[in-house]
Image (cartoon, helix red, strand yellow):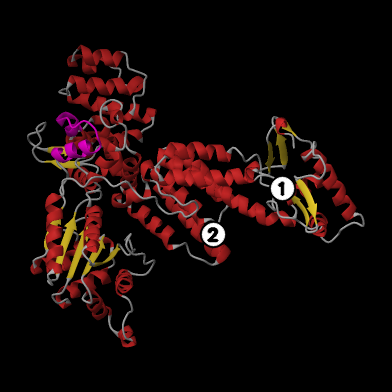
Amino acid sequence: MNSTEGRTTYRLLGPVEVQRGDSTLDLGPRQRRVLLTRLLIEDGRPVPANELCRSLWHDGQPAGAMSSVRAHISRLRSVLDPVREGRSTVLVADSAGYALKVPRDSRDTATFEDSLHRVRGALKRGQLFAAQRELDTALALWRDEALKDAADYAFAAPERSRLNAAHQDAKELQATILLQQGDLERSIEVAEGLVLSAPLRESSWALLMRALYAAGRSVEALRRYERFRGMLAEELGLDPSPGLSRLHTAILRHDSDVLEGLLPSPAATTLSAGSGSAPVPVTEPLVGRDEETAQLAAVLSAAAAGRTEWAVISGEPGSGKTRLLEEMATKAAAEGFAVARVGGGQELSSHRKVLGGRPVAQLLGTLRQDGGDAGPEGHMEEEPLDQLVRELTRAPTLCLIDDLDWTPPDFHTLLLRLVDALPDAHVAIVCALRNADDPSASGLLSALARRGTTWLPLEPLTVADVTELLAAHGGSAAPEEAALLHRRAVGNPFTLGELLRLPPERRTGPAARVPTAVRSAVHARLAELSEPVRTMLRYAAADGEWLDIGLLSEIQAMPLHLLLPLVDAAVAARLLVWEADPEERPAGGYRFPELPREVVLSTLTPSSRQLTHAALARKLIDRGDADPARLARHLRVAGPTAPATEPRWAHFGPEARTSARTPSHTHPAAPGCH
């Protein structure tokens, strides 16, 4: 082939094409194009002439089939190798049959697969932009369905299936990258297409569930799980895998402790296409937990000396309970301890993978993986408590129980019996739960209190801790910036970590944004609340940072004894906080933290926002003693719905009167409604 005519490329990701330089070659009729497809997918291996005949005509070969194949071969040679001298080196014939000898990288199928390999490599290195750019180039190679000219030929079915699976892998990578970038709507759109094109492919459903959850549409995510589960049972008689079931459970619980695993940052991505597994989250510096880390180290030292130790870590979601367990597990493993970990009815450890089953079975299974055989056959008849005591005391062991408050009652009962049954040995057992006052664990916690257990309630981080985090991220450690971040995150380590992943100008100030994972968590908490609570929160968010209980009571025509339980429900959902003696309000009050308040405001449409502010303005006018600036803000945002009766607010001064006469028709973003 004359190299001056340009590079020749062979394209199978659509109708078969051969391009030389800028020109597309005329390959002739469909049967010839199918023959070329048959040779291309063999990657240079020879195909006997009689096999080519069977490929083109199945069992209904005409009398002149062999002559027709030879004629097609001759025409293809003249097109693919027009300036040859002597025998062709492109489409060759020998005793084994006909073979198409072209460089691997001249076929778009090979180029596509090589690109996918580079995409996965870039993701493993945390190079999200490079992965996206490479993936866009790879997907652009697809012009239509693979091997389209041979779509109804039996020989093409295996290769079409393989290429379609690779294309599905690529689209899953695309949905994942979009999810990492926060482009949630496009990620959902791609994932929707994936489950339509491959309705029984579990990893695609997992991606769709993650994307919906990240967008605050947890109810839809749960419905998609149910749809897939029903389809799987009907079509194959199977249940979803343990991995997808764990994702379903995490969405049901709206647990911020696992959000980093479900919604990781781009720099943390380690992905195997089609696996449906969660990427590995970024590890933030562990700050503000020096005392807790020291106490857990003391627990481990006592266990190493032969004394059984118990510890309980408690704290709200995102406070760092799981992170402390991971740090302790790493330290214990380095010191020669066997590490067993279960949580919430599901295995959560990166050290051991025990899929399915109840916590007792998981714990025993994990311990046996660490220690070898289960023992004599007679042990199978032992009750679980005896088995657990034997397995725990066989070697130095650290047992970690995460999400204790989500484990079933029979597991609590077993642990309660274990407190008294476990002798002194090289054993440490550490439990983590959200609330140490949770009635579900009261019996066990009471027994542990009598035993001298180490208690580690995790408090919010301090401004000094935030300063240290800022410095670790290479940013400004100015006290003012640290204080703003601390207030915005209410000292929650998970929320702070998500804020610090944003560009500095997006963390605080006029251009501040709510991190995707935090927005999803707030939406999930809102979805669990009753409509009256959500209505109260919408009015409260529009009014300002501090709740005016009297105003909320008036605007909802609700007496205080009915309103306050709604406020308590919002406090329990961690959307409101009570501050007993803040500088702004010496008498104390309920505060609406910035991030959840901004999320609630973002749920209001422009018209509903105007109506909400108009209603608040009317009540403030009726009071006659409102702050003029506060009233003016409500009138301005109310726009055309603002009250328009001049005498009603004449005594509020020129600022309020001007705002009422010339209401703004703009619709500020949620943070602008403060």
Q: Closest to the observer: 469 or 463?
A: 469
Q: Position of residue 325 (x, y in %)?
A: 23, 57
Label 1 CA crowd tier, 10 Å (few <14, some 14–19, many 20+): some
Q: Of the residues shown, which amino acid type is indicated by label 2?
A: Met
Q: Which mark is residue 101?
A: 1
Residue 621 appears in view: yes
Please tell me whether residue 378 belongs to the stretch shown in magenta. no
Residue 192 appears in view: no
**Which residue is drawn at the image coordinates 88% and 55% (left, top)?**
65
Q: Of the residues shown, which amino acid type is indicated by label 1?
A: Lys
Name the chief secondary structure element in magenta. Answer: helix
Residue bearing mark 2: 231
Which residues make up the magenta segment?
Answer: 463-484
Q: Position of residue 413 (x, y in %)?
A: 22, 72
**Which residue is drawn at the image coordinates 27% and 82% (left, top)?**
383
- Lower position in the chain sequence, tag 2 or tag 1: 1
Per the image, label 1 sits on a secondary structure element best described as loop
Q: Closest to the observer: 530 or 170?
A: 170
Q: Position of residue 600 (x, y in %)?
A: 31, 37
Per the image, label 2 sits on a secondary structure element best described as helix
| Marks 2, 1: nearer the viewer | 1
Residue found at the very far right of the displayed protein: 63
Considering the image in quadrants, where does the C terminus appear?
top left
Q: Is residue 266 left or right of residue 455?
A: right
